[in-house]
Image (spheres, rainbow, N blue to C red):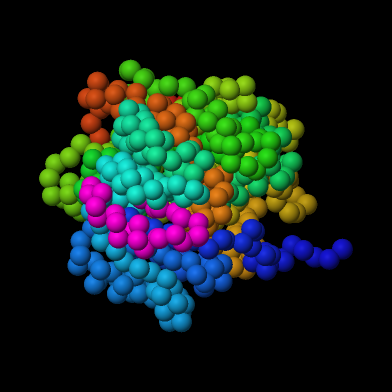
Amino acid sequence: MPDTHHANPSATPERTPVPAFDLVIFGASGDLALRKLYPAMAHRDSEGVLPPESRIIAMVHQARHIEDLPQQIIARLGAEGLSGETIERFMRRITILQADANDPRSFAGLAEALGASPHVRAFYLSTAPDLFVPICRNLATHGLLDGEARLILEKPIGRDLASAKEINDAVAAVIPESRTYRIDHYLGKETVQNLLVLRFANTLFERSWSSRDIDHVQITVAETVGLEARAGYYDKVGALRDMVQNHVLQLLCLFASEPPNQLEADAVRDEKLRVLRALRPIKGADVTRSTVRGQYAQGSIDGKSVPAYTEELGHPSDAETFVALRCEVDTWRWAGVPFYLRTGKRLGLRSSEIVVVFKPVPHSIFANVAQEALVPNRLVLRLQPNDGLQLHMMMKVPGSGRLKLVPRTLDLRYDTAFDFRTPDAYERLLTDVIRGDQTLFMRRDEVEAAWAWVDPIIQGWVEFNAKPIRYPAGSWGPSQAIGLIERDGRSWVDPEDI
Ligand code: BG6
């Protein structure tokens, strides 16, 4: 048998070729476009995936960006390590136009630039959500959303269920759901997609994937960054809306869903929706028992002192930069299995992972080893950094003396298993839109079901005056987050313990 273990999958051909496209980016001089969108497309370009005639139309609000944007993009692509030749070729694809999102007349230039181009058209709204509706209306007024045009919406879609519905209704009035792509970039991460492969391309784990064998699940998305340059956005939103409503719940959905019948957009999204709808509501006084809100105070990360959130912000604030939650999925599969979720900024380590803690063995057959000494199996799915998975299990210490058992780890790292650069999430997601594949995008009903679960938590915080508890930057959040899990006789598996 040939050894296929280490075959380089980057040698496998691309899926369906990417058709020629015109990608129009609104918010083209913004942080997301510069940090993620241009680099993603330029990497795809360097791999030869983008057809030569494809174009990127960068829509800016202020005339001065027509001048300074190209230099900013070039600097960013250089920092990505792309070659001068790739950057030059990529820059030739870009046209910069100015438009006021609220002024229909200013869309005439865009309409003219697109003209009767036969390319697949995709409009990426990388703007504040309050511009989604005017931009959509103005695109529709100029007939730009007709035919096969696609619309890409960046999160957050609204700030609660009512505002999300409003946006979704306005979008639905101008373009069908089948051509609307709501981005949650976590779904584009390699390891997140690998969760589906781990579960459904292997029999080993799926048979144990339920309350029969699993004691509880922990999902941690920890960041070391603070407010960055996003005060205007973040302070109005907070960690629950910024991270839990979307990324963390999407991880939970992929983890807890039933097997979709096939890897196809609606089959996958139907199953995720069922999980969201089965999440037991956390409301009323339960909010104070099952959730913890935190806000970082001054502290230190990597030996460097960092200021408090409010110092970075410049004024007092009740926005949370940390949330921990205990929740349950009321389904046959998951009855009685708590899911502990936590996410925060300025924590001790940048690390996202799902930790699956299995049940202990029912009885120790080893005369000199108490049952409690048999550490339950633990599967850790590391999303970032050092993507991979680890299985912790008990082993015999070699030797002929008294039988000794110790926990040891089976460690699979993607960077050693596969010899290629891990693409950024946006690289896949953008070309998926152009190909017309909605599998990794959130459907309207998913977004709304997630808000329907999150809204009562926010209402509970208001009703019970649950202000964020200060935690020192560089820690793992307020000690109440530890209490949340320890009350159940369990404890967080902190990434440094792994
Ligand atoms: C974004 C949030 O969606 O995700 C940010 O708005 C957060 O606050 C970011 O920092 C985290 O993404 P990643 O890919 O760095 O884990």
Q: Residue at x 64, y 58 (%)?
A: 16
* Residue 68 lies in the magenta-colored region: no
Magenta highlight range: 102-125
The number of callouts visible is: 0
Q: Is 118 colored magenta in this rendering?
A: yes
The relative height of residue 73 versus residue 85 in the rendered view (above or below) is above
Toward the left, the furthest residue is 315
Residue at 36%, 20% in the rendered image: 283
Instruction: Residue 461: tell me if it is visible.
Output: yes
Residue 460, given in percent of the width and then of the height, sits at 30, 23
Q: Residue at x 28, y 43 (%)?
A: 134
Q: Where 299 falls versus 156 (above or below)?
A: below
Residue 301, by quadrant, is bottom left
Q: Is residue 426 left or right of residue 414?
A: left
Q: At 46% from the left edge and 69% from the top edge, which residue is drawn?
A: 42
Q: Nearer the viewer, residue 332 or 93?
A: 93
Query: Which of the pair 268/359 is nearer the observer?
Result: 268
Left or right position of 434 against 17: left
